[in-house]
Image: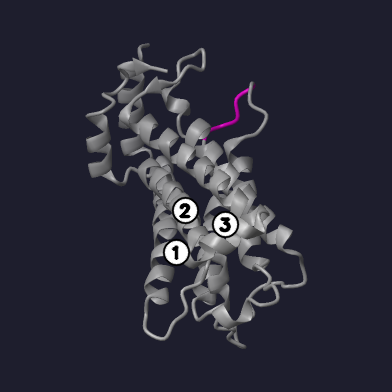
């Protein structure tokens, strides 16, 4: 059976399969939540008499702390409920468990908020009623949870979401859709690399903090995650149509 026939049969089944339609809703919810979080924090931070925080995580110490925690927990729960493709014999980790690991990462970011360092207090709002997480930890717990989440999302974009567009040999067939997924995965990896010097090099962190560098990098990574999941839920049809003009379906092999 050729690739075009496989895709046509898959599209027909997806349109009538209630379980698949339910998956679409979960994927779309993840996408919308991903877009909602950075945008809502941006709007809040630009309001008069507000302090725009250096990172998404540090909005925990503002009136948006409950929104941050709630959104991350919702993302984690949706990921925990995701099953995806059945595990193949040659795979060491199923889609379900990869999603659960990512979900635990998202919940870990929410429940183990970034700890304040000495001297940070003046730039934060420090609301006494914001106490939604467990603060008796080192920042590596929060950062490690974030790293797990982003790495799992990159794996989803590059390897999981493209399973249906691979030949029996595993070779990727470049379509408009696979181009979106792989691009999102590469962007996520790029943001992880870009955040490393901020975390590891104090002089670099001091130089770029006024430009909200970490918030921008985190937001780009979250937007890439949201784009991939929303497209996997059959959203962003205009984006798909535009990309299809660059990579016509099943015409170029990787």
Is tag 2's residue or tag 3's residue first in the polypeptide sequence?
3
Residue 96's x, y, as percent? Answer: 59, 41
Alpha-carbon neighbours of circle 3 within 10 Å: few (<14), some, or many (≥20)?
many
Q: State if disc 3 and disc 2 touch (CB < 8 Å).
A: no
Q: Is residue 218 above or below residue 14?
A: below
Which portion, as a residue range, is magenta?
85-89
Residue that mark 3 sits on: 76
Q: Please, what secondary structure does the residue beneath circle 3 have? A: helix
Residue 88 on the magenta span:
yes
In this rendering, position of residue 46 left or right of residue 156: left
* Distance CA(mark 1)–CA(mark 3): 13 Å
What percent of the width, then of the height, locates residue 22? 42, 48
- In front here: 227 or 10? 227
Is 34 inside the magenta-drawn segment?
A: no
Frontmost residue, 140 versus 26: 140
Spatial CA distance of label 2 from label 3 is 14 Å
Q: Residue at x 57, y 70 (%)?
A: 58
Instruction: Look at the numbered discs 2 and 1 and tell me whether their residues touch, using CB distance below 8 Å.
Output: yes
The image quadrant that residue 179 belongs to is top left
Closer to the camera in the image, 79 or 59: 59
Q: Which residue is mark 1?
A: 37
Picture residue at 31% right of the left edge, 46% below the top: 235
Nearest to N terminus: mark 1 or mark 3: 1
> Looking at the picture, how far across and down is residue 26, in whole percent?
44, 51
């Amino acid at each position: 059976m050729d690739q075009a026939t496989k895709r046509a049969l898959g599209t027909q089944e997806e349109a009538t399969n209630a379980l698949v339609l339910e998956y679409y809703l979960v994927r779309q919810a993840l996408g919308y939540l991903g877009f909602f979080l950075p945008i809502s924090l941006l709007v809040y931070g630009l309001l008069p008499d507000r302090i725009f925080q250096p990172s998404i995580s540090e909005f925990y110490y503002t009136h948006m702390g409950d929104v941050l925690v709630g959104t991350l927990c919702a993302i984690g729960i949706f990921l925990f409920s995701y099953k995806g493709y059945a595990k193949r014999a040659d795979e060491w980790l199923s889609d379900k468990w990869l999603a659960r690991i990512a979900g635990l990462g998202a919940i870990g970011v929410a429940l183990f908020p970034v700890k304040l360092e000495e001297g940070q207090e003046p730039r934060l709002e420090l609301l006494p009623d914001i106490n939604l997480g467990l603060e008796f930890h080192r920042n590596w717990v929060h950062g490690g949870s974030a790293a797990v989440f982003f790495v799992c999302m990159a794996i989803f974009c590059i390897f999981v979401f493209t399973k249906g567009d691979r030949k029996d040999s595993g070779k990727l067939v470049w379509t408009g859709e696979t181009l979106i997924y792989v691009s999102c995965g590469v962007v996520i990896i790029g943001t992880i690399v870009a955040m490393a010097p901020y975390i590891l090099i104090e002089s670099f962190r001091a130089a770029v903090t006024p430009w909200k560098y970490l918030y921008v990098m985190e937001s780009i990574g979250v937007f890439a995650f949201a784009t991939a999941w929303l497209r996997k839920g059959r959203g962003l049809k205009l984006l798909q149509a535009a990309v299809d003009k660059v990579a016509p379906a099943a015409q170029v092999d990787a």
